[in-house]
Image (cartoon, rainbow, N blue to C red):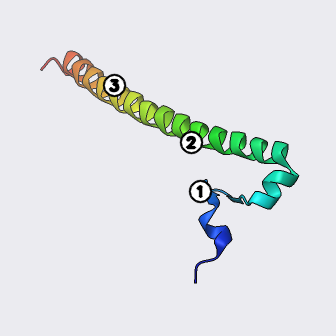
Amino acid sequence: MKNKLESNSVNSGITTYVFTAKTYKREPNRNKNVLKRYANILLTNKFKSDTHDNNVKRIASRATQNKSELNRNSKDITGD
């Protein structure tokens, strides 16, 4: 049988936060902070993945530019 707490949990991929009616009534501010932190984790992970993709693209384009420059320079040197 599935635990009641599991159905109320939010999984951020790093930590699982469990919300129940009792804890929310007892500590509403703490739970708001947890939700804010969860949203920040999601945004940060999205931002990191976007910047990582952009860095990979930039490095790949730079590598192809360098390769074409090397080919151009070697032709100049050898006179081919």
* Residue 63 position by quadrant: top left
Which three-letter amino acid code belongs to the residue tagged 2? Asn
> Residue 1 appears at what percent x and percent y?
58, 84
* Pointer 1 residue: 13
Q: Is residue 56 above or below residue 76?
A: below
> Residue 76 appears at what percent x and percent y?
21, 15
Q: Are marks 2 and 1 in contact (CB under 8 Å)?
A: yes
What residue appears at the point 60 percent right and 58 percent down from the top-left corner?
11
* Residue 17 position by quadrant: bottom right
Task: Classify the position of the C terminus by image quarter.
Answer: top left
What residue appears at the point 28 percent right and 20 percent down from the top-left corner?
69
What residue appears at the point 58 percent right and 42 percent down from the top-left corner?
42
Q: Which mark is residue 66?
A: 3
* Pointer 2 residue: 45
Q: Earlier in the sequence, mark 2 or mark 1?
A: 1
Q: Is residue 38 above or below residue 15?
A: above
Tag 3 secondary structure: helix
Give the class, few, some or many, for how many residues have Cα within 10 Å of label 3's Cα (few <14, many ≥20).
few
- Tell me how far mark 2 sits from mark 3, CA to CA: 31 Å
What residue appears at the point 60 percent right and 37 percent down from the top-left corner?
44
Tag 2 secondary structure: helix
Q: Are marks 2 and 3 in contact (CB under 8 Å)?
A: no
- In the figure, is residue 4 to the left or right of 75? right
> Residue 16 appears at what percent x and percent y?
67, 60
Q: Is residue 59 above or below residue 80?
A: below
Which three-letter amino acid code belongs to the residue tagged 1? Gly
> Which residue in the rendered view is the most extreme toward the right?
26
> Which residue in the rendered view is the most extreme toward the bottom?
1
Q: Earlier in the sequence, mark 1 or mark 3?
A: 1
Which three-letter amino acid code belongs to the residue tagged 3? Asn
- Tell me how far mark 2 sits from mark 1, CA to CA: 10 Å
